[in-house]
Image (spheres, rainbow, N blue to C red):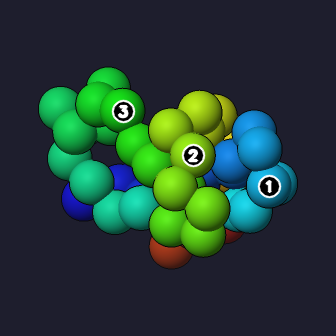
């Protein structure tokens, strides 16, 4: 399952959740302050291959 990064719009706390794609569309709450206004944050992506390009 993919990991998604979120940031609370109230306290600025950053957290990540491991969830299915269907769960990604659901509303989330900040684990620190309980605010329900969290925004999705783009995470860094690293692709590793076994061949040289």
Distance from the alpha carbon under mark 3 to that under mark 1: 17 Å
Distance from the alpha carbon under mark 2 to that under mark 1: 8 Å
Q: Can residue 18 be seen in this view?
A: yes
The mark found on residue 35 in the picture is 2
Q: Where is residue 19 in the image (x, y as percent from the top left)?
A: 27, 54
The reply, left or right, for residue 13 in relation to residue 26 is: right
| Secondary structure of the residue carrying numbered label 2 | loop
Residue in the image at 34% along x and 63% along y: 18
Q: Which of marks 3 and 1 is in front?
A: 1
Identify residue for label 3: 27
Residue in the image at 77% along x and 44% along y: 10
Residue contact at pointers 2 and 3, CB within 8 angstroms: no
The reply, left or right, for residue 41 in relation to residue 34 is: right
Residue in the image at 45% along x and 49% along y: 29
The mark found on residue 11 in the picture is 1
Q: Nearer the viewer, mark 2 or mark 3?
A: 2
Residue in the image at 74% along x and 62% along y: 13
């Amino acid at each position: 399952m993919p990991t998604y990064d979120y940031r609370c719009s109230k306290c600025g706390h950053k957290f990540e959740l491991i969830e299915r794609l269907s769960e990604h569309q659901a509303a989330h709450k900040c684990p620190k302050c309980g605010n329900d206004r969290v925004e999705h944050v783009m995470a860094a992506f690293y692709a590793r291959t076994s061949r040289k390009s």
